[in-house]
Image: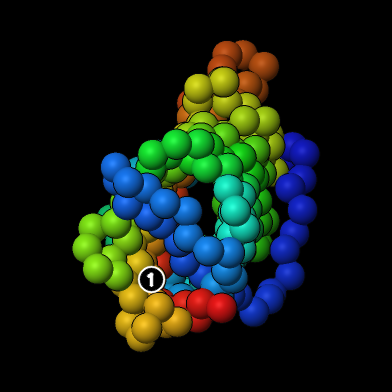
Amino acid sequence: MRGRKVGRLDGWTVATAVLCLSNLPTFQLSAQHVSVGPQIAFGDYREVSSDLHYRGSGIAGKATLQWKKFSADLVLSKLKYKPSKDGTATLEFDASEVDVRLRYYITGPVSGELGFIHRTADPEFEAQSVGAVTAGARMAYLLGPGVRMALNGGLMFGSKFSGGGSTSGLGALNLGLGLTVDAWRGRVQVTSDYAFQRFSRKTDDGSAPLDAPIQQSLGRIGFALVF
């Protein structure tokens, strides 16, 4: 039986934006701004074991708002996953995801962040829909003129799965890498992002807990307009 449902996402037009980062050790906050733009997404999804292996592509986007020490990211993606030839999966599915992050600048290159993720599988029985609260930190660096990199990592709490199951307090993590390059006077940027999620999920059929992990890697590349 399926457990508690994680709500369904309708199709939408996605937008993207880039992080405004600064230098280390003389890290400085950039002026307030908004940036948005589209991206192409590529994903790798595994559920329960590496035998259930899918690869897919689709559209994604990111919007960023920054004001003083506060910033917020909204990432939307929609991918069509197809069974990988090296696995035993037979049916394809669509995955729609919302990833929201709120950040507060602390010191040097470090900001703390809090947010949530919500991913819906369609058809729902082909993969797990999932929702969780995220908490972690981000480090931002200026690699050279107009080239910025960000590393982020953290844990995911209160995970809910459409097929039931749970994770421990340290059993769900997310990692990310972002790179932006100024393409035209700071108003247009080339963007690339990589995100990794793993849920060390366990289910219980009444006899004993069973391992049923979920893992997704998602890469995105595109551009953003900065206002």
The single residue placed furthest to the top in the displayed view is 207
Residue 225 percent across, percent down from the top left? 50, 81
Instruction: Assess disc 1: are there few (<14), some (14-19) or many (≥20) residues with their C-alpha within 10 Å of its C-alpha.
Output: many
Q: Is residue 155 above or below residue 95?
A: above
Looking at the image, which is closer to me, 222 or 218? Answer: 222
Q: Is residue 15 left or right of residue 45?
A: right
The C terminus lies in quadrant: bottom right
The single residue placed furthest to the bottom in the displayed view is 184
Using the rendered image of the protein, determine whether residue 40 is visible from the camera's viewpoint: yes
Type of amino acid at the residue the image marks with label 1: Thr
Q: Is residue 171 above or below residue 141?
A: above
Looking at the image, which is closer to me, 175 or 123? Answer: 175
Q: Residue at x 24, y 68 (%)?
A: 145
Residue 142 percent across, percent down from the top left? 29, 56
Using the rendered image of the protein, determine whether residue 94 is visible from the camera's viewpoint: no
Under circle 1, the secondary element is strand
Residue 123 percent across, percent down from the top left? 65, 62
The N terminus lies in quadrant: top right
Q: Residue at x 74, y 37 (%)?
A: 3
Q: Residue at x 62, y 30 (%)?
A: 157
* Mark 1, residue position: 191
Q: Is residue 123 left or right of residue 48?
A: right
Q: Residue at x 77, y 39 (%)?
A: 4
